[in-house]
Amino acid sequence: MPSEPLHPSKPNPGLPGTPWLAKRIIACLDVDAGRVVKGIQFQQLRDAGDPAELSRAHAQAGADEIVLLDITATSDGRKTLVETVRRTARELFVPFTVGGGVRTLEDATRIFDAGADKVSINSAAVANPALIGEIAARFGSQAVIVAIDARRGAATADAAEVYVSGGRTATGKKALAWAREAEQLGAGEILLTSMDRDGTGAGFDCELTAAIASSVSIPVIASGGAGNAEHFVEVFSAGKADAALAASIFHFSSPNFGTNTMAELKQTLLNAGIPMRWPC
Amino acid sequence: MIAIVDYGAGNITSVRKALEHLGADAQVTSDASVIAAAQKLIVPGVGHFSRCQVLNQSIRTPILEAIKNGKPFLGICVGMQWLFAGSTEAPEIPGAALFAGKCLRFPAAVKSPHVGWNQIEVSSGSRLLKGVSNGAYVYYTHSYRAPVVAETVACTNYGDAFSAAVERDNVFGVQFHPEKSAETGLKILENFCAL
C-alpha cells in the first residue's frame, strides 16, 4: 500500500512544465550479411562492426530504441539475419526493431522468436497490404511498423509518392493515403523516410512529416536528413514527429561520438523544450 | 523457479532474456502443473485484452491459487490489466478482479496507442519500485489503461492519470514493459526476483 497518496494532477515529476511522454531518438544500424556497414565511432568496442555490440553501445549512450535494417543483397547473406537478431537482442533492454528481411508472416515470426519487439515492413507491405493485418493479428499492432520511403521533389507534401525496392521503384501511391491505409490495416507506427533528404544532412523533411503525422493517429518516426541537433528540434516541433531516426549522424558526425554526443543531443532538445528521456 | 506464463500474448522472449540477464531461474510455460510448482509467477503480454481468454481457462485456477498462497505474482501490460475486473477492449472477457475497476481506452484528446518512454510518479513504500526514482522513464505501448486505485504505487499522466504500477501484498502489476525499460526496468525485475 502506498504510504502517501498520489497526486495525479501534479505536473511532470521530473521536468516541471513539460509534457510527460518523451520524444524518441532511434539509432539505426544498417547491416549487411551480419555486419554493420557505415562506420563506427565507439572507441571502446572490441568489434565495432558487430551489430550486437554496437546496439548495446547505442543503448548505453542513451538511444531510446534500436532499429536494425538488413540491407543484404545476397540470399546467402540474408540467412544470417535471424542469428544476428538473436545475438543483438540477447543483451538489449530497450525496444528493438528489425527491418529489411521481412516479407511474410513466417519471416516476422522468426524475427520475433529471435527477440525483436517490432518488425518494419516496406516493399512487402506495398506488394501485399494484408501482411500488415496478418502480423498485427498474431503479434499485435504495436509490433508492426510500416516503413514508407517517399519522394516529392519540389512538389507539396500531399504530392509525395511512395517508392519501394530501396527507393528504386515508384509505386504511384501517395504517401499520405498509404500512411492512412497502413494505419487502418493495423500498423502500430509509421517510419517515414524522406528520399529527398536521405543522406544529405540538410535536415528532416518537416513539412512532409507534419502532413503524415496530422493524417494518422499512430506515432510517426521521421527519418532522412539528420545532420545536426537543430534538425531534431525542428522535426519534433514543426515536423510534429513522435520519434526521429538517424544512422550516419551517430556514426560519422563526430570522431568521438559516444556517450557525450547522444547526451548532448538530448540536452539540446531539452533546452528547446522537447521532452526527452533523461537522464539517458 | 519463476514461471513465465505463455498464453499466446507475445513478448515472452524479451521477459525471459531479461530474467536470464539477472541470473534468475525462469521457465516459460503454459502447463498448469509447472505453474502450480513455481515459486513466483510472471504473466507478461502485449496486445489485445481478448488474449486473456486463455488465462481464464485451465490455468486460471492454479494462477489464482498461487496468488492466494502468497506467491509473488507480476502482471505486465495486458497481464496487469487482467488483474482488474476487465477491459472495454473485450467486455466479454472477465479479468481476475483482484483490483477494482475496468480498463478503458485513452481519451480521444491524445494520440493512441500511447507509445514510448513516459515518466512514473512513484509513491514511497513500494517493494516492487524500491530504488526507482520519482520521474523515472519507462517504456509503454498500449491503448487501454487501468484506473488509479487505492493500491496504485505509480501513475503516469497521458490524457489523464492511470495506474503505471499496482501492488498489494504479493500481487504486483506494471502497465509498462520493464524488460524494455533499460536500467529502470531491470531494477524493477531485480526487485521482483529478490522478493
Image: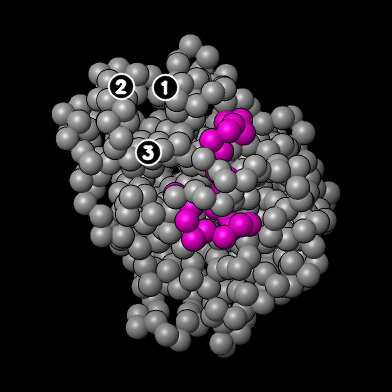
Q: Are marks 1 and 2 in contact (CB under 8 Å)?
A: yes
Q: What is the chain letter for disc 1?
A: B
Q: Is residue A90 above or below residue A38?
A: above
Mark 1 highlights which residue? B96
State which quarter of the image contains the C terminus of chain A. Answer: bottom right
Asked which quadrant contains residue B38, the reply is: top left
Of B91 and A113, nearer the camera is B91
Whole-Å distance between the Cαs marked 3 and 1?
A: 15 Å
Q: Position of residue B39 (x, y in %)?
A: 23, 41
Whether residue B71 sits left or right of residue A192 in the image: it is left
Mark 3 highlights which residue? B170
Q: Residue at x 44, y 67 (%)?
A: A55
Q: How is the protein colored in the picture?
A: one colour
Mark before the other along the chain sequence, 1 or 2 = 2
Q: Residue furthest front?
A: A3
Q: Position of residue A13 (x, y in %)?
A: 70, 55
Q: What is the chain letter for disc 3?
A: B
How many numbered marks appear?
Answer: 3
Whole-Å distance between the Cαs marked 2 and 3?
A: 17 Å
Q: Residue at x 74, y 67 (%)?
A: A270
Membership of B150 in magenta stretch: yes
Membership of B5 in magenta stretch: no
Mark 2 highlights which residue? B60
The 10 Å Cα crowd at callout 1, few under 14, some 14 to 19, many 20 or more, is some
Is residue A262 visible in this depiction of the protein?
Answer: yes
Q: Are marks 3 and 1 in contact (CB under 8 Å)?
A: no
Whether residue B23 sits left or right of residue B178 in the image: it is left
Where are the magenta residues, as a range? Answer: B128-154
Task: Identify residue type, mark 2.
Answer: Arg
